[in-house]
Image: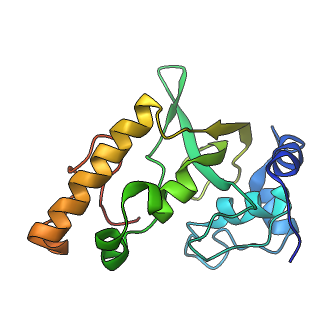
Amino acid sequence: MKIVTRTTAINNLKKHIGKDLRKLALKHGITTYETGKQNKGWKGLVLERLAGLENNVSKAPNGLSYELKSVSFHNVKNELTPKETMAITMINPEELKKHSFFESHCWAKLKSIVFCAVMWHGQNSENAELLKVASLDFAEDDELIKEIKADYNFIREKLIKKGFSALTGKDGKWIQARTKG
C-alpha cells in the first residue's frame, strides 16, 4: 500500500481547485449517477483518488495520520453556505460503550482532517467543483473539542443507560447520532 502524507494529499488536491469533479469521476471510472441512481459517495471517491489515496471503506483514517472529508456548499443569499453537516463516522454501539472519547475512532478521525469544500449545483447536477482544501488540526484542550467530547459523553451515557433506540439526531450540539443519508 502506498503511503500518502497529509502534505502530499493537500498539494495533490489543491491542483484540482476549480475543476469539475464529475468530469474527473468519469475519467477515473467512478459512477456518479449514470445508472439512473445517484452514487452518494462519488465525490468522496474522486477526492480520495485525486489526493493519491486508495479508495477506503474501513473506519480507520484515510491517510497516514489524517482523515479526508468533504462538505457540499451552495449559495444562500449570495453567500457560500454548507448544504449539510459532515459525517465523521458511523456509530458502533459496542465500541461507543467501551471507549472514552480520546480512545474512540471518532477522535482518531476528527483530530486531523483534510477538509474539502465542494460546490453543489443541485441533485444529479452535471458538475461539482472543488472550491477549497484546508487542513484542520485539533488538540485535546481546544474549546471546540471539549464541546464535542461533551456531546460524545452525553450520547455514550444515553446509549449505556437507555439503549441504542433512545439515540436521536438532537442529542448533541456538534455531533449527533443520526441515520446516514
Q: Position of residue 154 (x, y in %)?
A: 21, 52
Residue nearer the viewer, 68 or 122: 68
- Residue 18, image quadrant: top right
Q: Is residue 123 in view from this perspective?
A: no
- Residue 98, image quadrant: bottom left
Residue nearer the viewer, 103 or 159: 103
* Residue 90 sits above or below residue 51 on the image: below
Residue appearing at x 33%, y 69% in the figure: 96
Residue appearing at x 69%, y 64% in the figure: 62
Quadrant where the C terminus sits is bottom left
Q: Position of residue 177 (x, y in %)?
A: 29, 60
Q: Is residue 159 in view from this perspective?
A: yes
* Residue 100 sits above or below residue 34 on the image: above
* Residue 40 sits above or below residue 114 on the image: below
Q: Is residue 139 left or right of residue 178?
A: right
Q: Position of residue 131 (x, y in %)?
A: 72, 36
